Amino acid sequence: MKKNQLGTSQLYVSEIGLGCMSLSEDHKTNKSIIDEAIDRGINYFDTADLYQFGFNEETVGKALKGKRNDIILASKGGNEWGSGIDGWRWNPRKSYIKEALKNSLKRLDVDYLDLYQLHGGTIDDPIDEVIEAFDELVEEGTVRYYGISSIRPNVIKQFAEKSQIISVMMQYSLLDRRPEEWFSLFEKHDISVIARGPVAKGLLTNNFKNKISDKGYLDYTKQELENILPELSNIAADKGMTMQQMALRYIIDQTPVSTAITGASKRSQIIDNVQSAEASTLSKEFVENIQAIVKKTTYENHR
């Protein structure tokens, strides 16, 4: 599988990555999924300490045992949970971020992370202190590079201008084109996009009819989805592609995007995702045709 540079780093990530949040609570099943991903050319694995309250990191660590040098491992921190906390709470303090990273490394059973990401963030956070924490982790060698996971423009702009982030993880799909407004900022600062949710909760797959709900999706109503999705499906079919292949190719063909991370709860889904990366690059004319069908939305809040 083709690999793309992440920002200006020495990390080269597969076009399709594995978002580990969808893994089960069974170590054996999870290992089979991760083994399939590696066998199919996926080298980027993304987890977080909040996923299953630590179990996700543990199961990913077990599955990747002995394969550390062959993969790019990423996790996230900033959401505090544990004894005395009802659910979880946001904690961007330097002391907590450094402690959270230490605990993540222990659960993953590794000495360092290739990429550590701030899992959220607000404009009211002590951003200089957060950046200092991540810079120190890099200096200490427990983190090679760092980024943020955010869809808040005001937060993203602060980190782009003041820190050494190499990536921003954002929800991005044909049905959620909000990140595109900020591509020029990313290109200016040599920051890569890690795209999550590229098939919009299954709406951008051939199974879309079973995924449409009365609530719609973002600013699309149910009726709009019922009109748009069949049209997209037909366009993909005329091109000899599945809806999923078209949706994923659209995302990974965008210049700032280094990888699109998809979830998988079974091995067959890994195969489907990888086949999308094997599809041909979409022509400019084809891209313009599908863009004309969907909305060009922007972020309304946190600007």
Image (cartoon, helix red, strand yellow):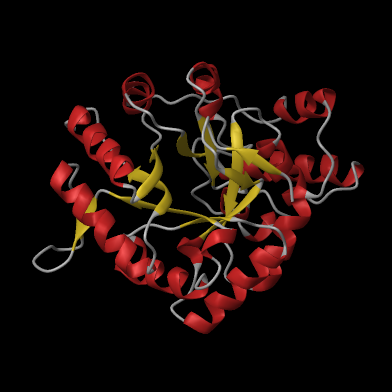
Give x and y (percent) for residue 126. Answer: 16, 31
Give x and y (percent) for residue 151. Answer: 40, 34
Give above or below for 176 relative to 26.
above
User: Toward the viewer: 45 or 180?
Assistant: 45
Q: Looking at the image, can residue 90 be seen? A: no
The residue positioned 49% from the left and 24% from the top of the image is 298
Q: Where is residue 210, by image quadrant? A: bottom right
Left or right: 270, with 180 as reference point: right
The residue positioned 61% from the left and 56% from the top of the image is 43
Left or right: 75, with 250 as reference point: left
In the rendered image, which quarter contains the C terminus? top left
Give x and y (percent) for residue 89. Answer: 18, 52
The residue positioned 67% from the left and 38% from the top of the image is 252
User: Toward the viewer: 55 or 144?
Assistant: 144
Give above or below for 66 relative to 103.
below
Left or right: 6, with 91 as reference point: right
Q: Looking at the image, can residue 241 be seen? A: yes
The residue positioned 31% from the left and 21% from the top of the image is 162
Q: Where is residue 127, by image quadrant? A: top left
Give above or below for 79 relative to 183.
below
How many marks are shown on the rendered structure?
0
